[in-house]
Image (cartoon, coloured by chain):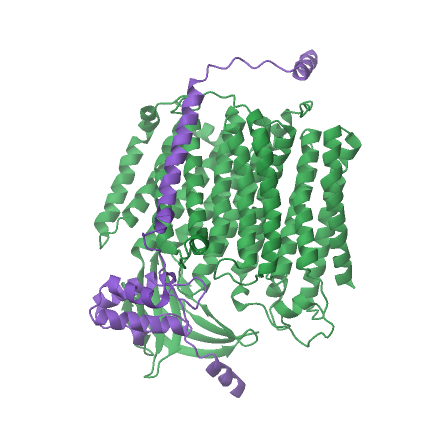
Amino acid sequence: MIRLILILVMLASPLWALSPDEMLDDPGLEARSRALDHALRCVVCQSESVASSNANWAEDARRTVRELVAGGATDDDVLDFFVARYGEFVLMSPRVNGSNWLLWAAGPLMLLLAMGVGYGYLRGRSKTAAPQEEALSDAEAARLREILKE
Amino acid sequence: MITEFGHFALILAFIVAIVQMIVPLIGAHKRWPAWMAVAEPAASAQFFLTAFSFGALMYAFIVSDFSLRLVTLNSHSAKPMLYKISGTWGNHEGSMLLWVLIVTLFGAMAAWFGGNLPPTLRARVLAVQSAIGVAFFAFILFTSNPFLRLAVPPFDGQDLNPLLQDPGLAFHPPFLYLGYVGLSMAFSFAVGALIEGRVDAAWGRWVRPWTLAAWVFLTIGIALGSWWAYYELGWGGFWFWDPVENASFMPWLLAAALLHSAIVVEKREALKSWTILLAILAFGFSLIGTFIVRSGLLTSVHAFANDPERGVFILMIMAFFMGGALMLFAFRAGTMEAKGVFSVVSRESALVANNLLLAVSCFVVFVGTMWPLVAEMFFDRKLSVGPPFFNMAFSPFMLVLGLILPIGSAMPWKRARILRAMQPLRYVFLLALAIGGLAFAMQTGRSLLGPIGMFLAAWIVMGTIVDLAQRTGRGSGRLARLTRLPRADWGKMVAHSGLGITMMGVSGLMAWQQEDIRVAQFDEPFEVAGYTLTLNDVVTSQGPNFISTTGYITLAEDGRQIAELRPEKRIYPVAQMPTTEAAIDYDLARDVYVVIGDEQVGGGWAVRTYIKPFTNWIWIGSGLMALGGLLSLSDRRFRVAAGARKAVPVPAE
């Protein structure tokens, strides 16, 4: 039993994300804070948002978000605050600026390109002269004769 | 001793694979029947040897043979039997062995059931398939040998990652691999046909069942993985746009595109070179997926087993197969002449649009997944691309795809009129709009996601049903004709409705989920969205290889108890890891999802409750998609008619 308790104490890190004592009383501010949690990446985790992570860092980040929000910061202020300290990596969704235009535009551009190529192909297909029934190769003709004979 | 036999069998399989890679290829080139015939027994031998080797490794896991390094690192004597078995592939070395086992399985299947292929094509396909095997045999034997012994075996092992000790995850990797590797068959057929210099309707018909099977397995594998994430990770997400998830999603998208374009090849002898390219790329993305998972190149929650050194090896394999196949494609694509002529508005064009959308959406996922790497290398920006980007950049493609699906599938081949195709669908369209409008009116908030999802789902499901009904023609006896429709028609209907239903689940969950986090005191009921939850007790108990803290919660609606919920958190002492086991009250309309947290200083326990509408439909839809694929696969055409064309082989040169 002592061993069990020891283990439990050793692993007493919070098992799951946001806990009740972190939450703000004002539901509106809390809702905004939660949206911000989802927009921030836990920098010590593997590919998890601050909202879903159990790491201590994420817990601190959630508290910071709530302090800032309660202090009257706008959403952008909060994001800027984190970007200034942890770099762009802390954002779940990259901002649309500089080279990131490439990322955001990649899909639509590719679609335009694909539609162009696709349309060209379809036009080509529909303009091709009606096909003559394709002549059989010698081997096929021989086989056809064989089948007909049977 | 069995371990050594297993090791030996693996080396033997490697050698057989080398023979099978070279001899039939030369045979097919020189038209020596004896040399071509080598492929068949070699494929069987390869499979049985690899299966024996895999069995030997599994045996070592079952009897907990800790003299094996792999078993020590990934198993524990107290682990339940199911996870001892699944532990065989719950690690890097074992999973690669499973991978190559499936490569040889598909090779053997092609040998057993490919009797009606032209002998040269069959020899070439089997040789290419074997070349893939050779690469991965070498990878296993030289960089990640599962059969290494330890000089000093320990008394007990270090246990499997507890997150992996779950029935859902025990079967997730095998299905995923069956899908990934199944695409190797499409690849082999594509390369075989390129060497052969001949792609025709028959080729389309041969390659389709393999692609279909691979796609079905991928669908099941992805669905299992997402279901597992939903109930195991403890916050009820089902898809995280994690690099590793994307890695499995990209081949799925391309395989779906390939399925549809192969239909055009089969029915209309058009889109040939595009289909070949798709087959090559689909397998290429499977390799990229393997590379991403195994190299740890991108940060991912799936970082269970990775090693940069091995990544380089897989990168080389990928470069070889993709480079080789694409080069061959560049040389030979010109020789494949399209025959079918069709107008800009036709079933063919609708399938082209389907392919464009699927391929571009795959491209978007690919760019998003790789962007952090590109940005760091070329723009010196360290950033991350997460779910918000993917949701925004990917979803529009699915929206358009859903919109055109019923119209496209109602259009006839060759030449169609949009208005005529729309005619039987117009009531359905209005009804679907009404359903979307109703959803909009009933919801709180102004998000359009939910209503659009409901509209699309209704439109797709009802549209495909109308389409099926149209196929029975007019007049009496339509019901009888309905039962006699080919299974492929039924498969199409079921799979397409599955897509619609999954869309409904995803949008419903994302739009209307409710969350509640609070400190619950014993026997003090609390309300969440019309449901009353009461925490009655919290009990600590000892499991086979973990310590569990279980909450006893009753769930009531309108004063009537509807469920007893047992959310649990577990601690695995050996692996030093906690896991959450959410308690879920499943229902078709909504899931009530409860997680228990920590005991609070001021008394009471933290309890987190989610109401998740329509969630189960995500997996029901996926199941229907897989079922539709299976129905199509069982169509008579594939079983019988594939043999109809036993043409005399035409010289490649």
Quadrant for the N terminus of chain B in the image: bottom right
How far across and down, in percent of the image, does residue B626 sit? 50, 44
When asked about the image quadrant of residue B337, the answer is top right
User: Which of the 4 image quarters holds residue B141?
Assistant: bottom right
Quarter that holds the C terminus of chain B: top right
Which residue occupies 29% across, 49% down? Answer: B449
Q: Can residue B205 be seen at all in this image of the molecule?
A: no
Please count the marks in the image. 0
Q: Position of residue B480 (x, y in %)?
A: 46, 29
The chain that appears green in the image is B
Q: Colour of chain A?
A: purple
Q: Is residue B97 above or below residue B31?
A: below
Q: Residue A112, position in %: x, y?
A: 36, 36
Query: In this orientation, which residue lies closer to the viewer: B238 or B185?
Result: B185
- In the image, is residue B410 above or below residue B440? above
Where residue B96 sits: x, y (%)?
63, 55
What's the residue at 74%, 72% (across, down)? B151
The quarter of the picture where residue B170 lies is bottom right
Task: Indicate whether B631 appears above or below B540.
Answer: above
Residue B17 can be seen, yes or no: yes
Given residues B482 and B161, the one toward you in this image is B161
Q: Left or right: where does residue B63 sit relative to residue B325?
A: right
Q: Nearer the viewer, residue B264 or B421?
A: B264
Against B440, is B428 above or below? above
Is residue B632 left or right of B582 when viewed as pictured?
right
Name the side, left or right, on which B101 lies relative to B365: right
Q: Which residue is located at x 53 percent, y 85 percent? A: A3
